[in-house]
Amino acid sequence: MEIRIINDNCTRCMLCVKDCAAAVWQEDNGVPKAAFPEDCTLCSHCLCVCPANAIEHSGLDLLQIKKIDKALVNPDAYETVVRGRRSIRHYKDRQVPDELIQKVIGLAGHTPTATNSQNVSYIVITDKEILKKISQTIFGFSVKVFHFTQKFPGNLIYTFIRAFSRSEVISRYLDPMPYYMDETKKGRDLILHNAPALILVHAPKGKNFSCENCNLAAANIMNFAYSLSLGTCYIGFLTLYLKHSKKLRRLVGIPENRMVYAALVIGAPAYGHARTASRNNPKIEWLK
Ligand SMILES: Cc1cc2nc3c(=O)[nH]c(=O)nc-3n(C[C@H](O)[C@H](O)[C@H](O)COP(=O)(O)O)c2cc1C
């Protein structure tokens, strides 16, 4: 990898040296020098911080490195996106153009990753048969669990769990099962919400920060999609199920050495939410 200073442009401000997290840049007799180019994590901080456009770097796409229009950074717009985005569970029966999904994922590629590993990849599923199979598999499992809790010995086990578990999560999903089964018979998809597309966000299996990298990207997908009038919904049921089911992992084509750490459906919302959400104020403890 070739990283170098264009001497005539460099003002010797040393911002490249100060801002380099990998200590690639070092000061050499008052001049910045890329002393350890092989350690570069390709974060592009040096090129972006340089006030004189004095750095050449063979490993980066220079076309992407553009002057930021600060006037476009609008806190009110950002706050509206974050407060206005909701999980969408009803979609119009229409495909999202591939280019739009590509645009959303393209921006998610700018999400930070640990040591700039950029190890997050995506599988986009629009095949209706595969989407149906995923929903049926996961909902079918819930139905089996529900039936198990309806007769001996499952009913005893369930009573025991309810009495001693502090979490209401299981009962919250199992108690309404008769209603959910009825809705499913009418054509409702309670797992992928009949969305036209599913985005699986994956990274190396079991590696430090794989989960964090994927979920930060997922958050950007949800927010950017909302700004483009698209709806999304995080599908935790699917990521949970994929962890345990080789069959489903095969169905979605996830390689053996990768794991899906976030899954989102995306599509045109069937209806919108005109008002922002009500949320608990975050509990903050200050140590001053
Ligand atoms: C980790 C995680 C898992 C989730 N899993 C599901 C899911 O499987 N199905 C679903 O419909 N919503 C799921 N959601 C959406 C949440 O229920 C939703 O974000 C929450 O109720 C707040 O509503 P809002 O997103 O509309 O503001 C999940 C959200 C997160 C963050």
Image: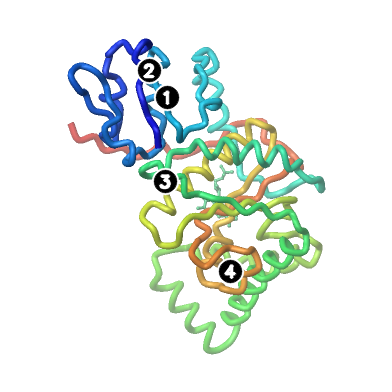
The quadrant of the picture occupied by the N terminus is top left
| Circle 4 residue | 174
Q: Quadrant of residue 230?
A: top right
Q: Is residue 27 left or right of residue 253?
A: left
Q: Secondary structure at mark 2?
A: loop
Of callouts 1 and 4, which one flags the residue occurring earlier in the amino acid sequence? 1
Q: Counting residues from the N terminus, which is met first, the one under dot 1 or under dot 3?
A: 1
Cα separation, mark 4 vs mark 2, equals 66 Å
- Res. 145 in view: yes
Of the residues shown, which amino acid type is indicated by label 2? Ile
First along the sequence among labels 4 and 2: 2
- Report the front residue among 87 and 223: 223
Choose the circle earlier in sequence order: 1 or 2. 2
Judging by the rendered image, the residue that carries numbered circle 1 is 56
Query: Separation of disc 1 and disc 2 at Cα?
Result: 7 Å
| Numbered disc 1: secondary structure | strand
For the residue with label 3, is its CB less than 8 Å from the closest atom of ligand 1? no
The CA span between labels 1 and 4 is 59 Å
Q: Would you name the residue on which mark 3 appears?
A: 117
SS under mark 3:
loop
Residue 4 picture location, percent across and down: 36, 25
Does residue 269 appear in this view? no
Q: Are marks 1 and 2 in contact (CB under 8 Å)?
A: yes
Q: Amino acid at mark 1?
A: Glu
In terms of depth relative to the viewer, which is nearer, 229 or 12? Answer: 12
CB within 8 Å, label 4 to label 3: no
Mark sitting earlier along the chain (2/3): 2
The x, y position of residue 101, in whole percent, is 68, 41
Q: Which residue has dot 2 on it?
A: 6
